[in-house]
Amino acid sequence: MDNLIILAVLISCGYFFGRHAEKKHYRSIVERENALISLPITSSRHVMILREIDSSRLVLGGVVISVDYFKRILAGLRNIFGGNVRSYETLLDRARREAVLRLRESCLDADEIINLRIETSSISKGGDSKIGCVEVLAYATAIYYKK
Amino acid sequence: MKYLPSLPEKNDNVSHNHPLSEFALLSAGLILFFGIVYLILGLLVDLAAEKISYETEAALFQALSSRVDYFDPQNDDLAEEKQRVQQIVDDLQTCTDLPYAIQVHIVKSDETNAIALPGGHIAVFTGLLQAVPQDNGLAFVLAHELGHFQNRDHLRSLGRSLVFYSLSAMLTGGNSSISGLLAPTFGLTAAQYSQARESMADRIALDTCNCRFGNINGAVDFFRYIIEMKLDSNLQIFHYFSSHPETQKRIDELKAYADSKGYQYSSF
């Protein structure tokens, strides 16, 4: 009985706080994406506009997001039945977009960003404590034209 | 190449259905599936408990009896108590058809309880001896435990808890959060099941007491102690989960049963 109460508290904490954090994060993501829309960014290895290049540099954007208790339980249930782990989809989507946003924010004065790559890794993978965290790292090359 | 700045109108990388509905669907499916498996295995355990012979049971739980003896204190006043309780059990046994001798063990603990263990052992906690000091009150409790032996409830409960722990271990492979989600379901069905078994053991206890003493005043005494000492101090909402039927309900049932059999008793 005690375990049940603790579990219910943990799940509802996870649900309400996790959902609140997620909504807030999505609002911030959309807002910043709109603000940065004019800075060109591609996964192409070549510059898009043929201009004389002054300099280029490596830019990075990384983020670590933890899964909440509700999502973890839901993913655990999915583990039994199989199928899309929907509860983790938003987690990874947020992490990817946040990483790219941080990358862009690190070079606001660049003229374009090329060769964008995204890496994902799970923190404490296989560890006994099973802290479900995901790290997403975005890296790219920032290009500066000759003025 | 021309660069067209744009953002997707709709996020196709995530599912848009509500996470709670997914949670409800998955956990309901899981609970249903394992509830059914638990029920089926529980029925098989019942079948096995009926079929297992006393000799096999004794042989199986040979190891347990050495463990039970381990709890037995060498204390002299407990040895006296043990002899007294053993005598009550021996006397009661003349009124049962149990083909083997029951051994009493006194365990030092504040719990007001006695348990029937496989292999013909009854563990009586010192808390019970303090709460119910008189022989005839104690006789009802002991007759109740003998009732469990007659119904083979000690094997059933052991088998069912074995099923429960195997299922939850199999299900999660050590991930305790999911088994925590399921545990109440098993606990609930187990409690409901064992309430029915407790009532049966109560009725057998009345039969035994009536055969031994010609009346069932022991039961009356026992419940008087319980009510006076408010031993049943569990909160109302937990009664659904507790294995022993609620005291008043238990008394009412016993009264009705005693009346139907015409047993003699002073007023409850």
Image (cartoon, grey):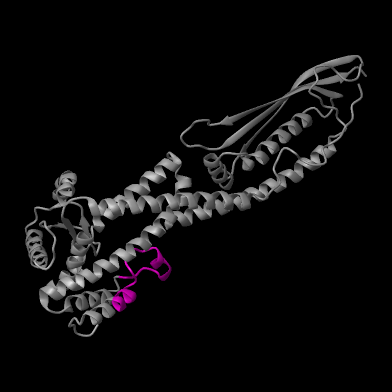
* x then y, percent, for residue B20: 62, 52
Would residue B190 appear left or right of A65 to someone viewing this image?
Answer: left
* x then y, percent, for residue A38: 88, 32
Residue A127, placed above or below residue A14: above
Q: Name which residue lies at 88% across and 20% down.
A: A48
* x then y, percent, for residue B44: 33, 51
Q: Name which residue lies at 82% across and 27% down.
A: A41
Q: Nearer the viewer, residue A61 or B116?
A: B116
Residue A85, placed above or below residue B117: above
Q: Name which residue lies at 55% across and 51% down.
A: A11
Q: Name which residue lies at 31% across and 78% down.
A: B252
Quadrant (top left/top right/bottom left/bottom right) for the C terminus of chain A: top right
Task: Please tell me in which quadrant of the rendered image residue B247 appears.
Answer: bottom left
Task: Please tell me in which quadrant of the rendered image residue A143 appears.
Answer: top right
* x then y, percent, for residue B227: 28, 76
Query: Outermost residue, bottom direction?
Result: B267
Would residue B220 appear left or right of B78 to someone viewing this image?
Answer: right
Residue B225, placed above or below residue B105: below
In the image, the segment drawn in magenta is: B232-253
Q: Nearer the viewer, residue B5 or B198?
A: B198
Q: Magenta span has B155?
A: no
Would residue A27 appear left or right of A48 to someone viewing this image?
Answer: left
